[in-house]
Image (cartoon, helix red, strand yellow):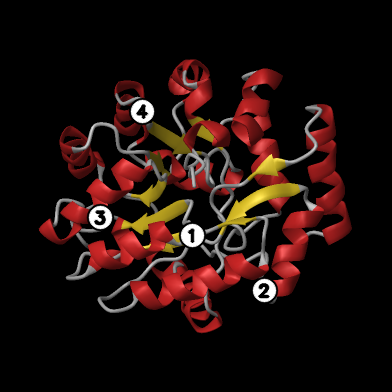
Amino acid sequence: MQNRDDDIRNVHRVLDDLELASIVDVHTHFMPHQVLAKVWNYFDTVDERLGRAWPIEYRVDEDARTELLREYRVGTFTSLLYPHKPGMAQWLNTWAGEFADRTPDCVRTATFYAEPGAGAYIRAALEDGVGVVKCHVQVGAFDVLDPHLDEVWALLDDARVPVVIHCGSGPEAGPYTGPTPIGALLQRFPTLTLLIAHMGMPEYDEFLTLAETYDNVGLDTTMVFTKFMEDVAPYPREALPRLKDLQHKIVFGSDFPNIPYPYAHALESVVGLGLGDEWCRAVLHDNWSRFRRPERVS
Protein backbone atom coordinates (compact mmCIF):
# COMPACT_ATOMS: atom_id res chain seq x y z
CA MET A 1 0.00 0.00 0.00
CA GLN A 2 1.42 3.36 -1.02
CA ASN A 3 1.74 6.19 1.48
CA ARG A 4 -1.50 8.18 1.18
CA ASP A 5 0.28 11.56 1.22
CA ASP A 6 2.47 10.44 -1.68
CA ASP A 7 -0.59 9.20 -3.54
CA ILE A 8 -2.35 12.55 -3.09
CA ARG A 9 0.73 14.47 -4.21
CA ASN A 10 1.04 12.28 -7.31
CA VAL A 11 -2.61 12.87 -8.21
CA HIS A 12 -2.22 16.61 -7.76
CA ARG A 13 0.92 16.59 -9.88
CA VAL A 14 -0.99 15.05 -12.78
CA LEU A 15 -3.86 17.52 -12.45
CA ASP A 16 -1.59 20.53 -12.07
CA ASP A 17 0.40 19.54 -15.16
CA LEU A 18 -2.90 19.44 -17.09
CA GLU A 19 -4.13 22.66 -15.45
CA LEU A 20 -7.21 20.87 -14.12
CA ALA A 21 -8.78 22.01 -10.87
CA SER A 22 -10.76 18.78 -10.52
CA ILE A 23 -11.70 15.58 -12.29
CA VAL A 24 -14.86 13.55 -12.89
CA ASP A 25 -14.70 9.87 -11.97
CA VAL A 26 -17.74 8.10 -13.44
CA HIS A 27 -16.88 4.69 -12.00
CA THR A 28 -16.62 4.65 -8.21
CA HIS A 29 -18.44 2.30 -5.88
CA PHE A 30 -20.38 3.11 -2.74
CA MET A 31 -22.93 0.63 -1.45
CA PRO A 32 -24.32 -0.78 1.80
CA HIS A 33 -21.56 -2.12 4.03
CA GLN A 34 -22.76 -5.72 3.92
CA VAL A 35 -22.91 -5.66 0.12
CA LEU A 36 -19.48 -4.07 -0.24
CA ALA A 37 -18.07 -6.70 2.14
CA LYS A 38 -19.30 -9.40 -0.26
CA VAL A 39 -17.74 -7.58 -3.20
CA TRP A 40 -14.43 -7.40 -1.35
CA ASN A 41 -14.68 -11.09 -0.53
CA TYR A 42 -15.07 -11.79 -4.25
CA PHE A 43 -11.82 -9.98 -4.99
CA ASP A 44 -10.10 -11.63 -2.03
CA THR A 45 -10.72 -15.02 -3.67
CA VAL A 46 -10.42 -14.11 -7.34
CA ASP A 47 -6.82 -15.35 -7.52
CA GLU A 48 -8.20 -18.89 -7.52
CA ARG A 49 -9.77 -18.16 -10.93
CA LEU A 50 -7.56 -15.45 -12.43
CA GLY A 51 -4.28 -16.85 -11.21
CA ARG A 52 -3.24 -13.63 -9.47
CA ALA A 53 -4.14 -11.75 -6.30
CA TRP A 54 -6.37 -8.66 -6.30
CA PRO A 55 -5.61 -6.79 -3.04
CA ILE A 56 -8.09 -4.00 -2.30
CA GLU A 57 -6.08 -0.78 -1.97
CA TYR A 58 -8.80 1.29 -0.27
CA ARG A 59 -10.40 -1.03 2.28
CA VAL A 60 -11.45 1.80 4.59
CA ASP A 61 -14.79 3.02 5.90
CA GLU A 62 -17.25 5.07 3.88
CA ASP A 63 -16.39 8.47 5.33
CA ALA A 64 -12.68 7.90 4.75
CA ARG A 65 -13.34 6.89 1.15
CA THR A 66 -15.41 9.96 0.32
CA GLU A 67 -12.81 12.18 1.96
CA LEU A 68 -10.02 10.56 -0.03
CA LEU A 69 -11.81 11.29 -3.31
CA ARG A 70 -12.12 14.92 -2.29
CA GLU A 71 -8.44 15.05 -1.37
CA TYR A 72 -7.70 13.69 -4.83
CA ARG A 73 -9.71 16.63 -6.21
CA VAL A 74 -12.44 14.43 -7.61
CA GLY A 75 -15.20 16.98 -8.00
CA THR A 76 -17.86 14.56 -9.26
CA PHE A 77 -18.16 10.82 -8.65
CA THR A 78 -20.78 8.05 -8.58
CA SER A 79 -22.04 5.37 -6.21
CA LEU A 80 -22.22 2.50 -8.67
CA LEU A 81 -23.96 -0.46 -7.08
CA TYR A 82 -25.62 -3.52 -8.54
CA PRO A 83 -27.83 -6.48 -7.60
CA HIS A 84 -26.89 -10.13 -8.06
CA LYS A 85 -30.42 -11.49 -7.59
CA PRO A 86 -34.09 -10.47 -7.93
CA GLY A 87 -35.69 -8.28 -5.27
CA MET A 88 -32.49 -6.42 -4.43
CA ALA A 89 -32.28 -3.46 -6.80
CA GLN A 90 -35.03 -1.32 -5.29
CA TRP A 91 -33.45 -1.60 -1.83
CA LEU A 92 -30.08 -0.62 -3.29
CA ASN A 93 -31.68 2.39 -4.99
CA THR A 94 -33.15 3.55 -1.69
CA TRP A 95 -29.72 3.32 -0.06
CA ALA A 96 -28.08 5.15 -2.97
CA GLY A 97 -30.61 7.96 -2.75
CA GLU A 98 -29.86 8.42 0.94
CA PHE A 99 -26.13 8.38 0.21
CA ALA A 100 -26.57 11.06 -2.47
CA ASP A 101 -28.61 13.19 -0.06
CA ARG A 102 -25.66 13.32 2.34
CA THR A 103 -22.98 13.42 -0.39
CA PRO A 104 -23.67 16.32 -2.76
CA ASP A 105 -20.63 15.66 -4.97
CA CYS A 106 -21.93 12.17 -5.78
CA VAL A 107 -24.17 11.82 -8.84
CA ARG A 108 -27.48 10.30 -7.75
CA THR A 109 -27.20 6.66 -8.78
CA ALA A 110 -29.57 3.75 -9.38
CA THR A 111 -29.45 0.20 -10.69
CA PHE A 112 -31.81 -2.53 -11.90
CA TYR A 113 -32.24 -6.25 -12.41
CA ALA A 114 -34.13 -8.16 -15.11
CA GLU A 115 -37.28 -8.82 -13.07
CA PRO A 116 -40.96 -7.92 -12.91
CA GLY A 117 -41.42 -4.36 -11.68
CA ALA A 118 -38.05 -3.10 -12.90
CA GLY A 119 -39.71 -0.45 -15.02
CA ALA A 120 -41.70 0.86 -12.06
CA TYR A 121 -38.73 1.35 -9.76
CA ILE A 122 -36.59 2.86 -12.49
CA ARG A 123 -39.41 5.29 -13.26
CA ALA A 124 -39.48 6.21 -9.56
CA ALA A 125 -35.69 6.64 -9.53
CA LEU A 126 -35.83 8.95 -12.54
CA GLU A 127 -38.54 11.02 -10.88
CA ASP A 128 -36.24 11.20 -7.84
CA GLY A 129 -33.56 12.84 -9.98
CA VAL A 130 -31.20 9.95 -10.70
CA GLY A 131 -28.33 11.06 -12.91
CA VAL A 132 -26.55 7.79 -13.67
CA VAL A 133 -27.52 4.11 -13.68
CA LYS A 134 -25.33 1.06 -13.23
CA CYS A 135 -25.96 -2.19 -15.11
CA HIS A 136 -23.71 -5.16 -14.34
CA VAL A 137 -24.39 -7.85 -16.91
CA GLN A 138 -21.68 -10.16 -15.59
CA VAL A 139 -22.69 -10.13 -11.92
CA GLY A 140 -26.42 -10.03 -12.66
CA ALA A 141 -26.09 -12.79 -15.25
CA PHE A 142 -29.06 -11.49 -17.21
CA ASP A 143 -29.68 -10.75 -20.87
CA VAL A 144 -29.97 -7.04 -21.71
CA LEU A 145 -32.68 -8.11 -24.17
CA ASP A 146 -34.81 -9.69 -21.43
CA PRO A 147 -38.43 -8.50 -21.97
CA HIS A 148 -38.59 -7.35 -18.34
CA LEU A 149 -36.12 -4.62 -19.31
CA ASP A 150 -38.00 -3.25 -22.32
CA GLU A 151 -39.60 -0.48 -20.25
CA VAL A 152 -36.34 0.20 -18.40
CA TRP A 153 -34.40 0.87 -21.59
CA ALA A 154 -37.22 2.99 -23.02
CA LEU A 155 -37.37 5.13 -19.87
CA LEU A 156 -33.60 5.60 -19.71
CA ASP A 157 -33.47 6.40 -23.41
CA ASP A 158 -36.20 9.00 -23.11
CA ALA A 159 -34.62 10.62 -20.03
CA ARG A 160 -31.13 10.53 -21.62
CA VAL A 161 -29.65 9.11 -18.45
CA PRO A 162 -26.21 7.53 -18.92
CA VAL A 163 -25.92 3.84 -18.08
CA VAL A 164 -22.48 2.67 -16.95
CA ILE A 165 -22.70 -0.89 -18.17
CA HIS A 166 -20.27 -3.70 -17.40
CA CYS A 167 -20.87 -5.86 -20.44
CA GLY A 168 -17.39 -6.95 -21.53
CA SER A 169 -16.18 -10.44 -20.68
CA GLY A 170 -13.44 -9.35 -18.26
CA PRO A 171 -12.27 -10.13 -15.70
CA GLU A 172 -14.54 -13.18 -16.00
CA ALA A 173 -17.00 -13.95 -18.77
CA GLY A 174 -20.68 -14.38 -18.01
CA PRO A 175 -23.45 -16.07 -20.00
CA TYR A 176 -24.60 -12.73 -21.48
CA THR A 177 -21.40 -10.68 -21.67
CA GLY A 178 -19.75 -9.53 -24.87
CA PRO A 179 -20.55 -7.05 -27.64
CA THR A 180 -23.23 -9.02 -29.49
CA PRO A 181 -26.11 -8.45 -27.01
CA ILE A 182 -25.17 -4.76 -26.70
CA GLY A 183 -25.16 -4.37 -30.46
CA ALA A 184 -28.64 -5.89 -30.60
CA LEU A 185 -29.82 -3.60 -27.79
CA LEU A 186 -28.55 -0.53 -29.63
CA GLN A 187 -30.31 -1.59 -32.81
CA ARG A 188 -33.54 -1.40 -30.81
CA PHE A 189 -32.58 1.78 -28.90
CA PRO A 190 -30.06 3.59 -31.11
CA THR A 191 -30.09 6.80 -29.04
CA LEU A 192 -29.55 5.06 -25.69
CA THR A 193 -26.74 6.63 -23.66
CA LEU A 194 -24.31 3.88 -22.68
CA LEU A 195 -20.88 4.23 -21.08
CA ILE A 196 -19.11 0.93 -21.65
CA ALA A 197 -17.27 0.09 -18.43
CA HIS A 198 -13.62 -0.95 -18.68
CA MET A 199 -13.78 -0.04 -22.38
CA GLY A 200 -15.41 -3.45 -22.86
CA MET A 201 -12.34 -5.45 -21.94
CA PRO A 202 -11.20 -7.74 -23.39
CA GLU A 203 -13.40 -7.15 -26.46
CA TYR A 204 -11.87 -3.71 -26.96
CA ASP A 205 -12.11 -3.60 -30.74
CA GLU A 206 -15.78 -4.53 -30.94
CA PHE A 207 -16.84 -1.98 -28.32
CA LEU A 208 -14.73 0.70 -30.00
CA THR A 209 -16.76 0.02 -33.14
CA LEU A 210 -20.02 0.49 -31.24
CA ALA A 211 -18.75 3.82 -29.85
CA GLU A 212 -17.81 4.88 -33.37
CA THR A 213 -21.23 3.86 -34.69
CA TYR A 214 -23.67 5.24 -32.10
CA ASP A 215 -23.69 8.90 -31.10
CA ASN A 216 -24.49 8.34 -27.42
CA VAL A 217 -22.17 5.42 -26.73
CA GLY A 218 -18.98 6.19 -24.84
CA LEU A 219 -16.24 4.22 -23.12
CA ASP A 220 -14.92 4.51 -19.59
CA THR A 221 -11.24 3.94 -18.88
CA THR A 222 -11.73 1.97 -15.67
CA MET A 223 -8.60 -0.11 -14.92
CA VAL A 224 -7.60 -0.18 -18.58
CA PHE A 225 -3.96 0.80 -19.38
CA THR A 226 -2.79 0.12 -15.78
CA LYS A 227 0.08 -2.29 -15.27
CA PHE A 228 -2.24 -4.67 -13.43
CA MET A 229 -4.68 -4.91 -16.33
CA GLU A 230 -2.02 -4.83 -19.03
CA ASP A 231 -0.79 -8.12 -17.58
CA VAL A 232 -4.30 -9.60 -17.80
CA ALA A 233 -5.97 -7.98 -20.83
CA PRO A 234 -3.56 -5.62 -22.62
CA TYR A 235 -5.03 -2.82 -24.68
CA PRO A 236 -3.98 -3.13 -28.35
CA ARG A 237 -1.61 -0.27 -29.10
CA GLU A 238 -2.68 -0.28 -32.75
CA ALA A 239 -6.11 0.91 -31.52
CA LEU A 240 -4.76 4.08 -29.87
CA PRO A 241 -5.41 6.26 -32.95
CA ARG A 242 -9.08 5.28 -32.69
CA LEU A 243 -9.09 6.51 -29.08
CA LYS A 244 -7.60 9.78 -30.25
CA ASP A 245 -10.40 10.16 -32.77
CA LEU A 246 -12.95 9.36 -30.06
CA GLN A 247 -11.61 12.05 -27.73
CA HIS A 248 -15.10 13.38 -27.02
CA LYS A 249 -16.49 9.94 -26.13
CA ILE A 250 -14.02 8.66 -23.52
CA VAL A 251 -14.61 9.29 -19.80
CA PHE A 252 -12.39 8.56 -16.84
CA GLY A 253 -13.28 5.81 -14.37
CA SER A 254 -11.19 4.29 -11.61
CA ASP A 255 -13.17 1.47 -9.90
CA PHE A 256 -12.29 3.09 -6.56
CA PRO A 257 -12.11 1.64 -3.92
CA ASN A 258 -11.85 -1.84 -5.46
CA ILE A 259 -8.48 -1.39 -7.15
CA PRO A 260 -5.21 -3.20 -6.43
CA TYR A 261 -2.98 -0.12 -6.87
CA PRO A 262 -2.90 3.57 -5.86
CA TYR A 263 -5.43 5.97 -7.37
CA ALA A 264 -2.64 8.04 -8.91
CA HIS A 265 -1.62 5.08 -11.06
CA ALA A 266 -5.02 5.10 -12.79
CA LEU A 267 -4.50 8.73 -13.78
CA GLU A 268 -0.87 8.24 -14.75
CA SER A 269 -1.82 5.30 -16.96
CA VAL A 270 -4.30 7.42 -18.92
CA VAL A 271 -1.91 10.35 -19.26
CA GLY A 272 0.91 7.97 -20.15
CA LEU A 273 -0.80 6.99 -23.40
CA GLY A 274 0.70 10.14 -24.92
CA LEU A 275 -2.50 11.27 -26.64
CA GLY A 276 -2.01 14.89 -25.62
CA ASP A 277 -3.06 17.28 -22.89
CA GLU A 278 -6.27 18.29 -24.65
CA TRP A 279 -7.32 14.65 -24.92
CA CYS A 280 -6.52 14.07 -21.25
CA ARG A 281 -8.47 17.12 -20.10
CA ALA A 282 -11.46 15.98 -22.12
CA VAL A 283 -11.34 12.47 -20.67
CA LEU A 284 -10.62 13.44 -17.07
CA HIS A 285 -13.12 16.27 -16.85
CA ASP A 286 -14.88 17.77 -19.83
CA ASN A 287 -16.61 14.81 -21.47
CA TRP A 288 -18.94 14.08 -18.58
CA SER A 289 -20.90 17.20 -19.52
CA ARG A 290 -21.64 15.58 -22.87
CA PHE A 291 -23.11 12.42 -21.37
CA ARG A 292 -24.73 13.53 -18.13
CA ARG A 293 -28.49 13.72 -17.81
CA PRO A 294 -29.89 17.04 -19.06
CA GLU A 295 -31.14 19.41 -16.39
CA ARG A 296 -34.86 19.02 -15.79
CA VAL A 297 -37.04 22.03 -16.52
CA SER A 298 -39.54 22.60 -13.72
Q: Is disc 4 in contact with disc 1, using a CB cutoff of under 8 Å? A: no
Which residue is more in the foreground, 19 or 293? 293
- Mark 2 and mark 4: Cα distance apart in space: 34 Å
For disc 4, the marked residue is 211
Distance from disc 2 to disc 3, alpha carbons, whole Å, reads: 30 Å
**Residue type indicated by callout 1:** Thr
Question: Residue lying furthest left in this view?
Answer: 147
Calculate the distance from the C-alpha at mark 1 to the C-alpha at mark 3. Answer: 15 Å
- Which residue sits at x=44%, y=36%? 219
Q: Earlier in the sequence, mark 1 or mark 2?
A: 2
Q: Is residue 245 above or below residue 128?
A: above
The residue lying at 69 percent from left, 77 percent from top is 61
Q: Earlier in the sequence, mark 1 or mark 3?
A: 1
Q: Are marks 2 and 4 in contact (CB under 8 Å)?
A: no
- 2 or 3: mark nearer the eye: 3
Disc 4 versus disc 3: distance between alpha carbons? 21 Å
Label 4 to label 1: alpha-carbon separation: 23 Å
297 left or right of 260 in image: left
Specify the farthest residue to the bottom. 34
User: Element type at marker 1?
Assistant: strand
Where does label 1 land, which residue? Answer: 109
| Label 3: element kind | helix
x 21%, y 70%: residue: 117
Q: Which residue does the numbered mark 2 point to in the structure image?
A: 62
Residue 181: x, y in percent?
A: 18, 44
Q: Which mark is residue 151?
A: none
Q: Amino acid at mark 2?
A: Glu
Label for residue 152?
A: 3
* Crowd rating for badge 4 (residues with CA inside 10 Å; few <14, some 14–19, many 20+): many
The three-letter amino acid code for the residue at tag 4 is Ala
What amino acid is found at the position of numbered circle 3 in the picture?
Val
Q: Earlier in the sequence, mark 2 or mark 3?
A: 2
